[in-house]
């Protein structure tokens, strides 16, 4: 009860409201039951992603309204970067990578390229860089978010990665 009052007073006096999410915006249709997902699971992560306000247009990486905007039910509040790299499977790989990164489950962030090369985040964060299906030590160890995003860009740029 004490925690609820603290949250209520915080919202009342700061004027902020919790982020809109899939769970708060989309109600379970009548006659159906919302299943509970395990705490800490990928499903819980996806359900809790913050959404941009209702009516926000889907934009391309260049800022133009996307041709698919008319089919958009919601827009996740997440940058897509400045290159045309996050479409289809890449978008799902990004979400999975983000989930594992924020859970600090770095060893599980792995994508296999069509060549069979295992492109894992641990090597990348430890300073190794991809070169012709090999790792080459080129940088300092860095597990920061900017390094993670550079790793994901490598994954997006390489042709036909397979999770």
Image (cartoon, rainbow, N blue to C red):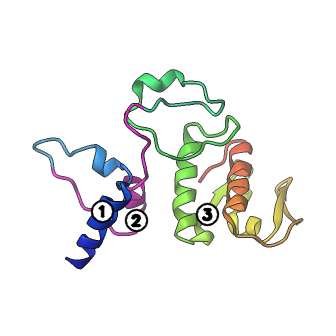
Q: Is residue 21 left or right of residue 98?
A: left
Q: Are marks 1 and 2 in contact (CB under 8 Å)?
A: yes
Question: SS of the residue at dot 1?
Answer: loop
Q: In which quarter of the view is residue 156 placed?
A: top right
Q: Nearer the viewer, residue 157 or 11?
A: 11
Q: What residue is pinned by disc 2?
A: 41
Q: Secondary structure at mark 2?
A: loop
Residue 39 among magenta residues? yes
Q: Is residue 107 above or below residue 15?
A: below
Residue 116 in view here: no
> What residue appears at the point 71 percent right and 49 percent down from the top-left corner?
153
> Residue tagged by mark 3?
109
**Is residue 129 shown to the viewer in this render?**
yes
Residue found at the far left of this picture: 31
**Disc 1 designates what residue?**
37
Percent x, y of residue 101: 58, 65
Image position, residue 49 (x, y; %): 43, 53
Q: CA distance from mark 3 to mark 2?
A: 15 Å
Magenta portion: prevailing SS class: loop
Horizontal side of 103 relative to 36 (left or right) equals right
**Mark 2 crowdedness (10 Å alpha carbons): few <14, some 14-19, many ≥20:** few
Q: Earlier in the sequence, mark 3 or mark 1?
A: 1
Question: Can you tell which quarter of the image residue 64 is in?
Answer: top right
Task: Give the Cα separation between the discs numbered 3 and 1.
Answer: 22 Å
Residue depicted at x 59% and y 54%: 163
Q: Quick one: 149 or 63, which is closer to the camera?
A: 63
- In the image, residue 67 sits, relative to residue 42, either above or below, namely above
Figure label count: 3
């Amino acid at each position: 009860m004490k925690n609820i009052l603290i949250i209520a007073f915080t919202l009342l006096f700061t004027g902020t409201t919790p982020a809109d999410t899939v769970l708060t915006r989309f109600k379970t249709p009548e006659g159906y039951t919302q299943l509970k997902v395990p705490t800490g699971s990928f499903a819980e992560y996806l359900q809790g992603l913050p959404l941009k306000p209702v009516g926000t247009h889907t934009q391309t990486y260049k800022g133009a309204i996307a041709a698919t905007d008319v089919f958009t039910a919601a827009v996740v509040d997440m940058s897509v970067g400045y290159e045309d790299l996050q479409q289809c499977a890449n978008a799902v790989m990004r979400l999975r990578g983000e989930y594992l990164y924020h859970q600090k489950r770095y060893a599980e962030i792995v994508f296999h390229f069509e060549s069979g090369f295992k492109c894992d985040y641990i090597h990348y964060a430890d300073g190794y860089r991809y070169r012709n299906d090999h790792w080459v030590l080129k940088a300092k160890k860095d597990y920061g978010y900017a390094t993670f995003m550079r790793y994901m860009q490598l994954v997006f740029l390489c042709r036909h990665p397979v999770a």
